[in-house]
Image (cartoon, rainbow, N blue to C red):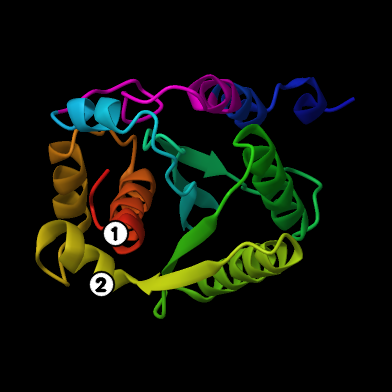
Amino acid sequence: MNDDENKTDPTTEKSSEVYSVIRKSRNTAVRRNSRQTENDESMVCAKNAHTTQPILLSLDLGTATGWALSNKHGRIMSGTAHFRPRRFEGGGMRYLRFERWLNETRDVSDEINAVYFEEVRRHLGVDAAHAYGGFLASLTAWCEEHSIPYEGVPVGTIKKFITGKGNAGKQAVIAAVKALGHLPEDDNEADALALLHFAREQMIGGQS
């Protein structure tokens, strides 16, 4: 028996915590994300507690996938899911785990009405490009299978929406997201949150 077999998968542990938060949030309106951060919009969320909103999932695809989900009451949860290949695994296992994560997220959310993903057209390296292509193919196939609308949004569009500048750096995006009351653990989560706010603006006109 090798050391890997004796280790607990931290991704599984974190996912369980996240799914628990999503389950509890399905009938809760006020708080903004999985870290229970409130901001000045909490009164607006409370006002709309009985108004059903579309359940949106936004993703910054990659081995470390940033995600953000808005439930039917407008409550936002977010985090980063890790799909790095483990020792002795084939390269395709990360995509199988990603699909399982999508299924579990959909199950605990009751449903997902639309998926938005960050559309990346330039990558720093070949490996990153291949990984992104694999996650994108897995995501779009999953959405087609479950009849869930999906849309890619260019990176520059997201940055301009959240910061006012289409060429803004990572720290500027993180700062803009924090100004909305979120506490992203990394730039992947921050990108997903920025994209989710863009999606909400497109779908419900920023009235949540």
Place residue 69 in its image quadrant: top left
Residue 140 lies, in percent from the top left, at 64, 69
| 139 left or right of 90 in image | left
Residue appearing at x 18%, y 32% in the figure: 41
1 and 2 marks in contact (CB < 8 Å): yes
The stretch drawn in magenta includes residue 206: no
Q: Residue 156: which quarter of the image?
A: bottom left
| Nearest the eye: 78 or 46 | 46
Evaluate whether residue 61 shows in this view: no
Q: Which residues are magenta?
A: 18-39
58 vs 79: above or below: below
- Camera-nearest label, 1 or 2: 1
Q: Quadrant of the N terminus?
A: top right
Residue 198, labelled with which disc? 1
Q: Residue furthest right?
A: 1
Q: Name the side, left or right, on which 44 lies relative to 186.
A: left
Amino acid type, callout 1: Phe
The number of numbered badges drawn on the structure is 2
